[in-house]
Image: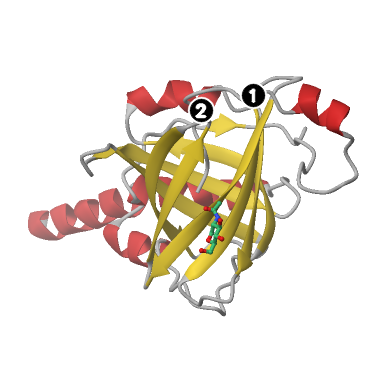
Amino acid sequence: MAAQLVVALLAFTSLSAAASESDCKELVKPLVLDSHSPIYGKWVLHVGSWDKHDLKTDLLSVHSSWVELSPTSDSGVISLYWADRLSEEKCLQGAANVSISGITSHTTFIINGHTSYHDGKYYETCSDCLLSEDTTLLPDGKSKGRYLFLFTRTGVLEPSELETFKKQAECLGFLPEYHFVSTDLCPDDRGESTSPADRKTETDQAENQPAED
Ligand SMILES: *[C@@H]1O[C@H](CO)[C@@H](O)[C@H](O)[C@H]1NC(C)=O
């Protein structure tokens, strides 16, 4: 009787835990990055998390962020355009090639002469969402830490979808800390619609800023 009670209590304990191991198996499914991956198009960042406190400061400087992923003629390469708003009048944007193999991607960002290396993984998530894990690599190839980013098409997210994100973050070993960004996006600086004068004020290149994968 006592043993049965202990078993029952143990079962209850694991049920009440935020995310059990088997939950995590269901919650965290890496996407295979092939040409059918539903990752293309423009995405607006909603929330980010991190696994090391050192990474927090960099992310907190980002007020809004969007990325656009598009296929290239090379099936192993995705074209990435990103734009981060750092303050009301300060935008930072640029392009990068993402090389993909299986479930991992590798991106080299060159921002104002500074090179940074990122490994990426994408996971199954809500429809019209993009869940991206970004590992920042130090020049020696060691990990500086990871970010987990949830993008949506509009930047808006349902509360239930946020709860799922938090569980996925927990499963992946992220801290239960989140940075929610605004949807006050930087304008796309690639087109001709922006005059060079506007562009000058909009795009004030800063150094050592984080970039999303
Ligand atoms: C991406 O790769 C293409 C083809 O190699 C190259 O022309 C282009 O400059 C690269 N873009 C960036 C941002 O590195």
Instruction: Please report the residue visible at 42 percent of the width from the left and 67 percent of the height from the top.
Output: 100
Ligand 1 in which quarter: bottom right
Q: Position of residue 141 (x, y in %)?
A: 23, 44
Q: Secondary structure at mark 2?
A: loop
Tell me which colouring the rendered structure shows: secondary structure
Instruction: Give the Cα separation between the discs numbered 1 and 2.
Output: 9 Å
Which image quadrant for residue 117? top left
Q: Position of residue 196 (x, y in %)?
A: 84, 32
Residue type at the position of mark 1? Leu
209 displayed left or right of 147: right
Q: Position of residue 102 (x, y in %)?
A: 37, 73
Q: Position of residue 76 (x, y in %)?
A: 45, 73
Q: 86 or 17: nearer the eye?
A: 86
> Which quadrant holds the N terminus?
bottom left
In this rendering, the answer to whether 171 lies above or below 46 is below
Q: In the rendered structure, which disc, 1 or 2, sits on the residue that comes first in sequence?
A: 1
- For disc 2, the marked residue is 209
- For disc 1, the marked residue is 86
157 displayed left or right of 48: right
Instruction: Please report the residue visible at 58 percent of the width from the left and 22 percent of the height from the top.
Output: 206
Residue type at the position of mark 2? Gln
For label 1, the crowd category at 10 Å Cα-Cα, with few meaning under 14, some 14 to 19 and many 20 or more, is many
Q: 179 or 161: nearer the eye?
A: 179
Instruction: Please report the residue visible at 51 percent of the width from the left and 49 percent of the height from the top.
Output: 165
Q: 63 or 29: nearer the eye?
A: 63
Asked whether the residues under the numbered discs 1 and 2 touch, taking CB atoms below 8 Å apart as contact, a structural biologist would say yes
In this rendering, the answer to whether 75 lies above or below 1 is below
